[in-house]
Image (cartoon, rainbow, N blue to C red):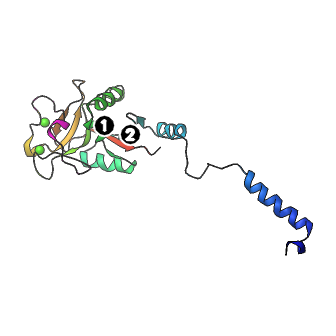
Amino acid sequence: MVGELKPSLIFMLSLMITSCWTMPVNTEGSGQLSEREIRQELLDDGWFIAGPDYAYKLTRTQISWGIGRRECKNMGGDLAVFGVRDNTLRWKIGQSLYKGPVWIGLWVGLNDRKVDSEWRWTDGSLAIENEILWSPQEPNGDSRENCGEMWGEDRRFTINDAQCRFRRYALCERKIVW
Ligand SMILES: [Ca+2]
Ligand SMILES: [Ca+2]
């Protein structure tokens, strides 16, 4: 069969096969970004990386807890949970953000809206007592205050229960897929 093919056709076929082998792997458009490119993309988009796999960003304006959560989701994340649960990370995030716009508190992914005094993270898990570093005398709002904010004024970035309708910047968190 091969013998019936013209030599020029065989040459062309071999050229095609060789070029396929030697063609450089094109990563552009394949969705495969390098770690450096992912970092740059997040940075350009206003996110900052804290912790191994998470990025953080504040909402543009101060809004209620519910709208804050929606905005975080629109930005590809949710209200911060991981970075709030971890004391060291929360402090680090707080310090970084305190250099930005002036704020009293930031909405985080914590609420007791369903059952009062039963604090849950927005991932649905029940917050264990020592997972939340409450501000002194907090939580004190009973059924009036059902949304968690990270308090900035004392620079300790402890947690306060606040009225969900209050206007705060929301602390959005996004897991980075490297
Ligand atoms: Ca409450
Ligand atoms: Ca309170």
Q: Quadrant of residue 150?
A: top left
Q: Is residue 12 above or below residue 78?
A: below
| Residue 101, disc | none
> Could you classify mark 2 by the number of other residues whose Cα lies within 10 Å: few (under 14), some (14-19), or many (20 or more)?
some
Q: Position of residue 25 (x, y in %)?
A: 66, 49
Give 34 or 94, whichever is nearer the viewer. 34
As rendered, which of 21 and 40 lies closer to the eye?
Answer: 21
Real-space Cα distance between discs 1 and 2? 8 Å
- Decide: few, some or many residues near mark 1? Use Cα within 10 Å; few <14, some 14-19, many ≥20: many
State if disc 2 and disc 1 touch (CB < 8 Å). yes
Residue occupying image coordinates x 39% and y 44%:
175
Left or right: where 145 falls relative to 177: left
Q: Decide: is 8 above or below 42.
A: below
Q: Earlier in the sequence, mark 1 or mark 2?
A: 2
| Residue 62 shows in this picture | no
| Point 28% across, 49% down: residue | 67
Q: On the image, numbered disc 2 is attached to which residue?
A: 54
Badge 1 marks a residue whose secondary structure is helix
Q: Cβ(mark 2) to ligand 2 < 8 Å?
A: no
Q: Amino acid at mark 2?
A: Tyr
Q: Position of residue 32 (x, y in %)?
A: 55, 48
Residue 145, image x, y percentages: 13, 42
Residue 49: quadrant of the picture: top left
Q: Which mark is residue 83?
A: 1
Q: Is residue 15 left or right of residue 118?
A: right
Residue range highlighted in magenta: 118-137
